[in-house]
Image (cartoon, coloured by chain):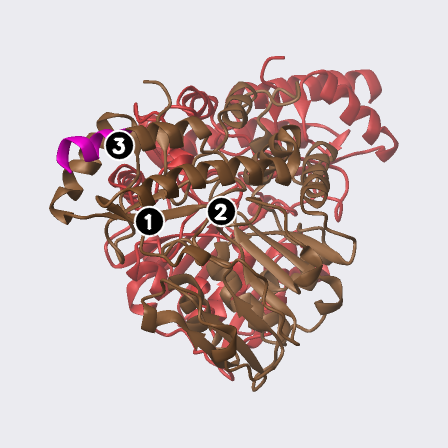
Chain colours: A brown, B red
């Protein structure tokens, strides 16, 4: 069949041109008579792939040489442990702001390795808004951790916190969706399977002056300094995932970079939120000031129609709209690789569905 | 160009039929209108991929339900830390047998988390033979670690050690090359990029009774019990790598399983070792009783010819024959996916090269 409109929260849609290129050279890459998967990570050809991917990412995000860029494995969840293991020793403190399922998980894992202070917890408002800064209880410590975009709740920060301690951000579902000022962060990390590439790769962008603080008990593979010193090749990296990420970065640059991408993402999100706001049939529960550009959860007024909605959507080629099992309802993840046409098709379907069942 | 003969030590050659299948369905997998990379790891379609890959691996290796099979990330190097973190607490002891670069690295990382006893070190013989069992100094402890096949040295055990403690084996470059008796091992682990699939995936096969011993300071992503309890989906796994590994397992089963594969591998290795032994021009330095089925290092009598050898080999489509930077000389890795025809082509080239330069 043709390609569907894929609103999966992750592993998410990849740009079709990237997949097509990977397909075309899957058995014979760069005329080498082998797949990019089948060559040594230490070969000049692959070293060029890795360094070119890093250079492209640095251009896209404006990352200066004050920061190391690391290709890691284990997803964001592995970084939940790597953050305290690299930045704090036993007994040190750190601040954690909880605004949804992912920052909550980061806290739970982090608290096993550091005295974790709960800055604020949006649970009272069911994670539908960001706790007011005035109500935060910042203790100070080795770092301040938060999640700028909660994939499950569809909640996104409109501002960057300004703690005294280095700011650590799990940007899994927002990185590359829009320009950011990297210099405001100590550490940015992200699982790849949203806007970067396939699952199995994680990016870490860390201010170099924060390297060298890892505790003795940090496993070598979680040690950022070792990764930086070895150009992310302390051992064999996930070569195919890095290659695909590089193609995604190239695609973003060709498109005009993150400002251009952000403009497209803004149009996509506005089209969908406008429809939700204009309707009494659909509802987005998140505070307007904290709506996510990437993950748009919504409910139907009559949840008895959920199954019908999902079934008819699938028949119309609109896939993976079911909300996270912990939240229910629907969720449209409209990452970079989801084209405007897909959002338009979704909105037209939603209009028609409301007319028939509303 | 056509496909070359690829003797890379890893990331290594993959079966051409596996790559061709992956290519054909890269943009539209199972008629879903999306790549297998673009669907949720929790979708029924992908769950079927993961469970079918596990079932196939269990059939190939005869793994009983007494063992958990885990799809992990971070390669064997991450398991170097995971082993002591899962099997021992601070102050516990464990035995390490060192027979080459990889078991040495496992010891170095393990010793950061456990009282590591050096059972024996083959360094005196430059890792060209396996230290005699009579000379081992086994202290006993939570486990006994060794590496049945050293990828760099080309050294392979012909027997399985029988310590009192659970036996832990880094089988990265031997797993699936021949049948093994899993029941003799407590833990088997392996990076995928030799006989299993692409880099970025690691297999752990662990006796279930050894689960539940992880120390408090074990990061969740390194915890085997958590991985087992979550069907290797504690977080998003490397879905594309698991899919490819499943295709490799299918390919092995269609070929007749590991006995059939071992017979082919034996013929490949014999062809190459026979040539080396019959020649005064080429030399394999490893003790005959400890020669690897998978990794065949060799030197030329005149190392001044090394560059010429490699250059002419490449011109003949025989790629990645350069030895590891720590050893020099040549190395032909003849993993499962390297066909007999490739070894035959290599041997014919070596014959001709010797005739011209010997």
Which span of residues is magenta-colored?
A: A349-358
Which comes sooner in the sequence, label 1 or label 3? 1
Viewer-closest of B37 and A134:
A134
Taking A184 as reference, is B52 left or right? left
Alpha carbons under labels 2 and 1: distance apart: 25 Å
Q: Answer yes or no: do the residues labelled 1 and 3 have beta carbons within 8 Å?
A: no
> Which residue position holds label 1?
A297
Q: Is residue A68 above or below residue A90?
A: above
The quarter of the picture where the C terminus of chain A appears is top left
Residue A351's disc number? 3
Does mark 3 fall on the same chain as mark 1?
yes
Q: Residue furthest front?
A: A278
Quarter where residue A217 is shown: bottom right
The quarter of the picture where the N terminus of chain A appears is top left
> Which residue position holds label 2?
A200
Find residue A226 and report its horizontal and vertical position in percent: 69, 61
**Foreground disc of the pair 1, 3:** 3
Q: Is residue B26 above or below residue B355?
A: below
Find residue A150 and report its horizontal and vertical position in percent: 43, 57
Alpha carbons under labels 1 and 3: distance apart: 16 Å
């Amino acid at each position: 069949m043709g390609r569907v409109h894929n609103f999966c929260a992750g592993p998410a849609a990849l740009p079709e041109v990237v997949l097509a290129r990977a397909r075309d050279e899957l058995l014979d890459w760069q005329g080498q008579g082998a797949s990019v998967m089948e060559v040594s990570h230490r070969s000049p050809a692959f070293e060029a792939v890795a360094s070119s991917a890093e250079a492209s990412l640095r251009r896209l995000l404006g990352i200066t040489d004050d920061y190391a860029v690391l290709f890691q494995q284990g997803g964001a969840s592995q970084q939940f442990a790597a953050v305290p293991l690299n930045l704090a020793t036993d007994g040190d403190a750190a601040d954690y702001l909880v605004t949804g399922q992912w920052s909550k998980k980061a806290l739970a894992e982090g608290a096993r390795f550091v005295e974790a202070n709960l800055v604020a917890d949006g649970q009272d408002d069911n994670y539908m808004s960001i706790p007011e800064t005035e109500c935060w209880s910042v203790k100070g410590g080795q770092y301040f951790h938060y999640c700028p975009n909660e994939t499950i709740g569809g909640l996104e920060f409109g501002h960057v916190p300004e703690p005294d301690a280095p700011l650590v951000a799990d940007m899994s579902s927002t990185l590359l969706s829009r320009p950011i000022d990297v210099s405001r962060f100590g550490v940015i990390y992200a699982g790849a399977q949203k806007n970067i590439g396939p699952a199995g790769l994680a990016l870490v962008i860390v201010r170099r002056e924060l390297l060298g603080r890892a505790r003795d008990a940090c496993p070598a593979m979680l040690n950022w300094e070792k990764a930086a010193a070895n150009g992310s090749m302390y051992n064999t990296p996930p070569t195919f995932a890095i290659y695909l990420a590089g193609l995604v970065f190239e695609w973003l640059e060709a498109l005009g970079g993150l400002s251009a991408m952000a403009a497209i993402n803004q149009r996509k999100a506005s089209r969908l939120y406008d429809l939700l706001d204009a309707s009494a049939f659909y509802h987005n529960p998140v505070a307007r000031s904290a709506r996510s550009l990437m993950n748009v959860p919504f409910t139907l007024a009559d949840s008895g129609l959920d199954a019908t909605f999902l079934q008819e959507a699938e028949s119309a080629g609109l896939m993976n709209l079911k909300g996270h099992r912990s939240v229910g309802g629907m969720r449209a993840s409209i990452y970079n690789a989801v084209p405007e046409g897909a959002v338009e098709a979704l909105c037209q379907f939603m209009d028609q569905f409301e007319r028939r069942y509303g």
